[in-house]
Image (tube, rainbow, N blue to C red):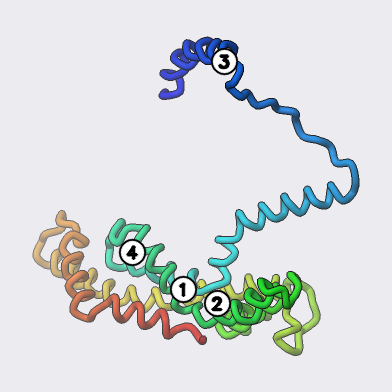
Amino acid sequence: MRAKRFLPLALLLLPLVLGACEGNPNVPVPKVTGVQPAQSPQDVALSLQLILGLTVLTLAPSILIMLTSFTRTIVVLSLLRNAIGLQQMPPNQVIVGLSLFLTFFVMAPVLQKVNDTAFQPFVNGQITQQEAFDDGMKPVREFMFRQVREKDLALFVHLAKIDQPKTPDDVPTYTLIPAFITSELKTAFQMGFFIFIPFLIIDMVVASTLISMGMIMLPPVLISLPFKLLLFIMVDGWYLIVRSLVTSFNT
């Protein structure tokens, strides 16, 4: 609707702009020449590398998030909010921000190893780009191996139809990553189940009390929400949740 409103104004201003450009030759007007065809295989390879690099940069945040403790953290915090019964409190920005900072805290030793063994030597020209990538993946793989379940890892090794690995170095990274994500989701849902239990008990007690009093039309959630918040405050819930999340990782 806004575009339709401004369209007549744009059509009226277009002749004025063109007239000003014709009257003032100093106004630069860009010339579009189109895309030049590749003249050699090297040009084609360079274009493909550029496209691949832009694609990796676009997916880099998602890739880095899935290889860290972020998945477990944000799932547990989201389940906590649902268990209390608060739909938008804390806001999504707070949940994501807390998850990111907890992820930085948990992954700090791993990131330090990546910086010492891969990034700094590569910046100083001591190793090549491929060596930096391989050395940088080692601490990340070690972290994922400490969290992954053997059952999940065996599943993806079977689905990939590769030989049974004898050592962790024999496990391909493309097999380790989905196994790690699956294990993180399972662990997060297990923690969420234990978080739901006390709040579920409060809902059941409040609902039974209201039914026994004949107050059927009164929503139980409206009454149980203050009690759930009171319970969460009395047990220092944020302290327990954050401590449980950080200590649940095998670092």
Front residue of 31 and 185? 31
| Marks 2 and 1, the one that precedes in the sequence | 1
The circle drawn on residue 82 is 4
Label 1 residue SS: helix
Q: Is 113 on the left or on the right of 31, as rendered?
A: left
Tell me what residue is drawn at x 66 percent, y 71 percent.
Answer: 123
What residue is disc 1 on?
Answer: 104
Q: Which mark is residue 238?
A: none
Kindly indicate whether the residue at mark 1 contacts the one at mark 2 (C-beta within 8 angstroms).
yes
Which residue type carries mark 4? Asn
Q: Are marks 2 and 4 in contact (CB under 8 Å)?
A: no
* Side (left or right) of 100 relative to 158: left
Q: Amino acid at mark 3?
A: Asn
Name the element at disc 2.
Answer: helix
Closer to the chain start, of discs 3 and 4, is 3
Mark 3 and mark 4: span between their CA atoms? 63 Å
Question: What residue do we see at 31% from left, 68% from top?
Answer: 83
Residue at the bottom extreme of this rendering: 166
Give the CA separation, mark 1 to mark 4: 25 Å
